[in-house]
Image (tube, rainbow, N blue to C red):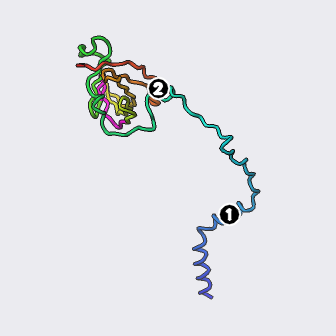
Amino acid sequence: MQSVYRIMTYLSTLLRPTLPLAALLAVAACSEPEEQADPAPGPAATESVIPEPHESEAAGADTAATAQVSTIPTAFQGVWGYGANACDDVASELKLEIRPTEIEFYEALGTVTSVEVENPQSIVVALDMSGEGETWELTNRFVLSENGTVLTPLETEDNPQYDPMPRKKCGS
């Protein structure tokens, strides 16, 4: 008799974790079947949306061919000034100094956390910023002119209010 009791105790211990599953399956088996949705339309009824060429150009890049890199490409590096004499003005508030792993703004420094190369003339840079006792994160898109002498910061999803102010490469 004790052996039967032990066997029953052992079996109940094994089955205990499966009882909630068994109850759930029993309820599911008793419920009404859901109505099937209309079958998916065939190829003739399928509508395809093809973006207009200007939409991808406005986004600033061909998103299908992006590459992640750890440093800012050489073509984007250097000192960039805004305005006629910005390169001569050492105190210019709109001057940018772009190095491989950081960007120096007026009274702020951004350390590169990621660089997405959209194409040879367009990158998106994520930065950990610090300046004037504050820290924050910033994402900027930078687009180079064909000849590489003008750099234009553009908006990103994370920075939608960015005012594009083209900067000229100093020393060029």
Depicted 147 relative to depicted 126: above or below: above
> x, y percentage for residue 127?
35, 33
Q: Amino acid at mark 2?
A: Pro
Magenta stretch, main secondary structure, is strand
Q: Quadrant of residue 3?
A: bottom right
Q: Nearer the viewer, residue 40 or 97?
A: 40
Q: Residue most toward the front? A: 44
Q: Amino acid at mark 1?
A: Leu
Residue ID at (25%, 16%): 87
Depicted 131 relative to depicted 11: above or below: above
| Nearest-to-viewer mark from 1 and 2 | 2
Residue ID at (57%, 33%): 50
> x, y percentage for residue 155?
44, 25
Per the rendering, the mark at residue 25 is: 1
Q: Nearer the viewer, residue 44 or 126?
A: 44
Q: Identify the residue position indicated by label 2 in the image.
A: 160
Specify few, some or many for label 1: CA neighbours under 10 Å numbering under 14, 14-19, or 20 or more: few
- Cα separation, mark 1 vs mark 2, equals 50 Å
Stretch in magenta:
103-115
